[in-house]
Image: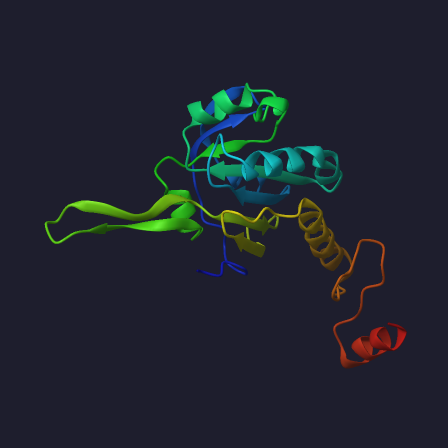
């Protein structure tokens, strides 16, 4: 599994459903460069079980992300038509109606491959025929990208393990605190708590209080 932290987030341009109802052909994160932090998260498949809980959980916290100037973008290897159809189904029927942030269609599987979250790989057998190992869908990868397009945080969960949206917000807060104040954020730090200077004295002072 590649570590992208500290590196430029891989570029892509792909179809997506935006605002829960409009299909666009060439969606890219480039539109946010210099303006917004981005949370890009991958999920395995439309019309499944853990995935809608995550998609709704991010939507439920959209006010918190927007207050922080953060754009949330989802991505799976399903088609844009599949995304659109799932968005028309009410929550109480297992759908994701009401989700408004962009959902990218990685039908070529190149985005998941470039972010190294694709579960499976292409190969050729002894007859030169293309085959695939694994289900060829995305793990639950999540990437926090700063305004310069650099990945600052990443997590990757296996298919059965849903993520914590609150932890994602905590990492956004830690990144923005560091950018604004130059201080580093210790273990279990929450917004509004004391951070510390990245010096031996700063660490000693913080540990003496905690």
56 to the left or right of 126: right
Q: What residue is shown at x 74% (from left), y 52% (from top)?
A: 173
Residue 100 vs 64, above or below: the answer is above
Q: What residue is shown at x 87% (from left), y 78% (from top)?
A: 208
Name the foreground residue: 124 vs 19: 124
In the picture, the quarter occupied by the C terminus is bottom right
Q: What residue is shown at x 75% (from left), y 66% (from top)?
A: 186
Residue 167: x %, y % from top left = 69, 51
Counting every numbered tag in the picture gives 0
Name the foreground residue: 66 vs 59: 59
Q: How is the image coloured?
A: rainbow
Residue 21 vs 109, above or below: the answer is above
In the picture, the quarter occupied by the N terminus is bottom left
Q: What residue is shown at x 43% (from left), y 23% (from top)?
A: 81
98 to the left or right of 47: right
Residue 156: x %, y % from top left = 52, 54
Instruction: Please tell me in which quadrant of the rendered image residue 106 appears.
Output: top left
Instruction: Please tell me in which quadrant of the rendered image residue 56 appears.
Output: top right
Q: Residue furthest left?
A: 127
Residue 71: x %, y % from top left = 63, 38
């Amino acid at each position: 599994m590649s570590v992208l932290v500290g590196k430029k987030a891989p570029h892509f341009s792909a179809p997506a459903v935006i605002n829960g109802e409009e299909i666009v052909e060439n969606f890219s994160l480039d539109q946010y460069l210099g303006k917004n932090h981005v949370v890009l998260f991958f999920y395995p498949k439309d019309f499944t079980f853990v995935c809608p809980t995550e998609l709704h959980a991010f939507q439920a916290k959209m006010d918190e992300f927007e207050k922080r100037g953060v754009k949330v973008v989802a991505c799976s290897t399903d088609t844009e038509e599949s995304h659109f159809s799932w968005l028309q189904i009410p929550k109480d029927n297992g759908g994701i109606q009401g989700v408004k942030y962009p959902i990218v269609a990685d039908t070529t599987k190149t985005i998941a491959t470039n972010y190294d979250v694709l579960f499976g790989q292409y190969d050729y057998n002894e007859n030169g025929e293309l085959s695939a190992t694994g289900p060829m869908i995305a793990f639950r990868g999540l990437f926090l990208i700063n305004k310069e397009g650099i990945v600052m945080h990443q997590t990757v969960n296996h298919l059965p393990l849903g993520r914590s949206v609150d932890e994602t917000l905590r990492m956004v807060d830690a990144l923005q605190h560091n950018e604004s104040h130059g201080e580093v954020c210790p273990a279990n730090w929450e917004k509004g708590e004391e951070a510390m200077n990245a010096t031996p004295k700063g660490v000693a002072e913080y540990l003496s209080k905690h």
